[in-house]
Amino acid sequence: MKRVISDNDLKNLLDEKFLEYNTPNFIDSDPVQIPHRFTEKNDIEVSAFLTSIISWGNRKMIINNADKMMKIMGDSPFDFVINASEKNIESISFVHRTFNSDDFKFFIMSLKNIYLNHGGLENTFSPKKDDQWVFNSITKFKKIFFSIDHMRRTTKHISDPVKRSACKRINMFLRWMVRKDKNGVDFGIWKKILPSILSCPLDTHTLRISKALNLISRSQNDIKTLIQLDEKLRHFDPIDPVKYDYALFGLGVDK
């Protein structure tokens, strides 16, 4: 007979694993190491955003290809976004799975538009005062991001909650930017979004472990499942629910 774990035991387990995995050592094997190379806010934002966008597949491959992105940008991502010449951008050669050179070129041009005309990345994600979720912020961001001329195929690289996506990569990026604690894995450089409205980055590891722990009842990786998980995590910690991403991801990777 399957043992039912009480909410209190679940919370204790997740708190314990959060403390175990949320350490500076986590940085060395995670894509978050790429933005940790930088100290200026705009460099951190740009490098983190681009790294998060290609964060699917093998972690080592993600890190290697994010490193290539930074080298293409002369290890000065924000300066490249703002000042790269048309010739610099056109010479880009890059591929990560289905994200190719044309996608990368557009992303640079769209980021430039965001910084010059929309107040920067943080501003484009800023929620309304009474928002309880970041879903509307993500949808708003996507509309701004693709408000300049673009190829239709490139839109698939930014997920949208309106299309029932759990938006794993964007939610991971937002966790990096918004969460802050003494261990310093997440940057906490954005102040316009409260950690309490963030959503857990739902990948195959967190989905499997969440189902095994009865945090969720569904198996689909979609927004409905994400809301179910978020509500449970907010019950455990209403102020900083996505801290438990460390616990779920770590348990999933370690099996």
Image: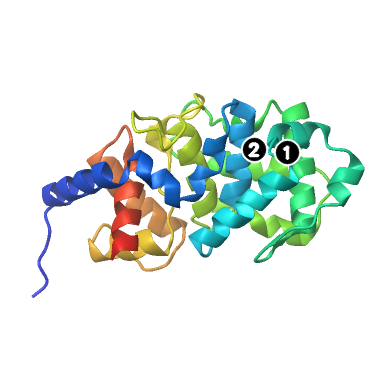
Q: x, y (%) of residue 148?
A: 81, 43
Mark 2, Cα crowd under 10 Å, few <14 / some 14-19 / many 20+, is: many
Image quarter for residue 93? bottom right
Residue located at (30% from left, 47% from top) = 21
- Location of mark 2 (residue): 46
Is 128 rendered above or below residue 105? above
**Element type where label 1 sits in the image:** helix
Q: Nearer the viewer, residue 82 or 207?
A: 82
Q: Nearer the viewer, mark 2 or mark 1?
A: 2
- Location of mark 1 (residue): 111
Q: x, y (%) of residue 207?
A: 36, 62
- The three-letter code of the residue at mark 1 reads Leu
Image quarter for residue 212? bottom left
- The three-letter code of the residue at mark 2 reads Val
Q: x, y (%) of residue 26?
A: 38, 46
Q: Do the residues under discs 2 and 1 have CB atoms within 8 angstroms?
A: yes
Q: Is tag 2's residue or tag 1's residue first in the polypeptide sequence?
A: 2
Is 74 rendered above or below residue 216? above
In this picture, residue 254 sits left or right of residue 100: left
